[in-house]
Image (spheres, helix red, strand yellow):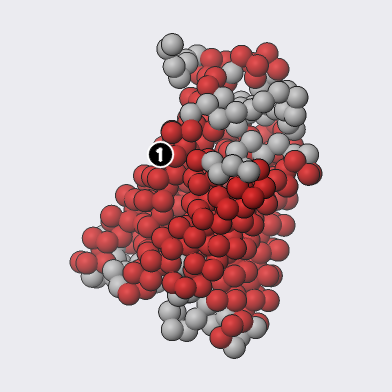
Amino acid sequence: MNAADTAFILVCSALVMFMTPGLALFYGGLVRARNVLSTTMHSFILLGVASVVWAVIGYTLAFGPDIGGVIGGLDFAFLNGVGMEPSESVTNIPHLLFMVFQCMFAVITPALISGAYAERIRFRAMLLFSVLWLVVVYAPMAHWVWGGGWMFGIGALDFAGGAVVHMSSAAAALAAAHVLGRRHGYGREPFVPHNLPMTVLGAGILWFGWFGFNAGSALAANGLAANAFVTTHLCAAAAVISWVAAEWLHTGKPTTLGAASGAVAGLVVITPAAGFVAPMPAIIMGLIGGALCYGGVLMKHVFKYDDALDVVGVHGVGGTFGALATGIFASSAVNTATGLLYGNPSQLWIQFISVVATWLFCYVASRILFHVVDALVGLRADTESEVAGLDVSEHNEAGYQL
């Protein structure tokens, strides 16, 4: 067991934990004032709920002994056998530390989905769906990619969660938009963010925490962590530039929201690639990815679905592009994998297979879960509650006393 690695991953775990309150601020500022608390609550409550679900059953399904490449066994249920000594697979840090680092990923991923159904879902439905989704969708995805499952077996590359976190949450977000339908008045009245400084603060916290997200996925305080840190920052920086440039050309004005969204888009794009690509390809990925995600946000107007806070456009498009770009730019000078540009075109095909499988599984499973939850507790707030705002109708409080 390595003391430096242990200290580093402890800090990274705290950084990733801080991302979820950051996401609460990011999303909270984007909705109308009457829904700021309900939207913030969607993220914050998962620090409690998802953490307990992960400890009880999620971790063992994701990282327990492999069963047929599909799911982990129940050896670690209720954290049985997860102690202060290293595990067989991660030998340099305590098993408990690896578990809690992964726990923070499990917390933020269902919180990302909440951006799609903001301003219209019942709180009890959100809670039930999140618990079921963590067990039925997230844990298998984590096992497939990181826990020795079939995607790991075919050599799919996902350093910190392009498929496990971003594509999975975006597929669920698309399912949510299709099942719940559009918000009352959508397309007929303006839906304007009520507090953009809050959103920019949230984006800054996300950028800060993302260093733990990506660099920490090296699971050691080493050169690979340094590479992941640098590629994360440079890709986000480049995506800010390209998103704002695309927006400026398209609308004639650069916006603060565009800069914040571009940063998050770049962070999403680099997530699967951070430990496989060098800094200059990361800049290229950011320049392409920021503009792509800007276009992805516009898709909802073309296809007429109400993804309230653009989860599909940012996390879906960004995660998909990042996964495919990993198959292009991965370099053995950084890690053991090699992509298309360095003589291994088969890696791009493997990445494509993993992308298609992730979207299909996560969308279908999530859509089924939404219908199950609707049948059990009812998904959507009634029109009167939605018009009044979910802060009052679901939580009996108001975000501002003005």
Residue most toward the top?
A: 402
Q: Name the residue rendered at 47%, 15% in the picture.
A: 397
Residue most toward the left?
A: 3
Q: How many labels does the image show?
A: 1
In this rendering, position of residue 288 left or right of residue 179: left
Q: Which of 59 and 157 is in front in this view?
A: 157
In this rendering, position of residue 280 left or right of residue 192: left
Q: Name the residue rendered at 22%, 67% in the picture.
A: 4
Q: Quadrant of the N terminus?
A: bottom left
Q: Name the residue rendered at 64%, 57% in the picture.
A: 292
In this rendering, position of residue 73 left or right of residue 209: right
Residue most toward the right?
A: 303
Q: In which quarter of the image is residue 122?
A: top right
| Residue 46: x %, y % from top left | 46, 38
Q: Name the residue rendered at 67%, 39% in the picture.
A: 307
| Residue 294: x %, y % from top left | 63, 50
Which residue type does callout 1 highlight? Leu
Q: Quadrant of the C terminus?
A: top left
Indicate the secondary structure of the residue bearing disc 1.
helix
Which residue position is annotated with label 1? 201
Q: Which of 212 and 84 is in front in this view?
A: 212
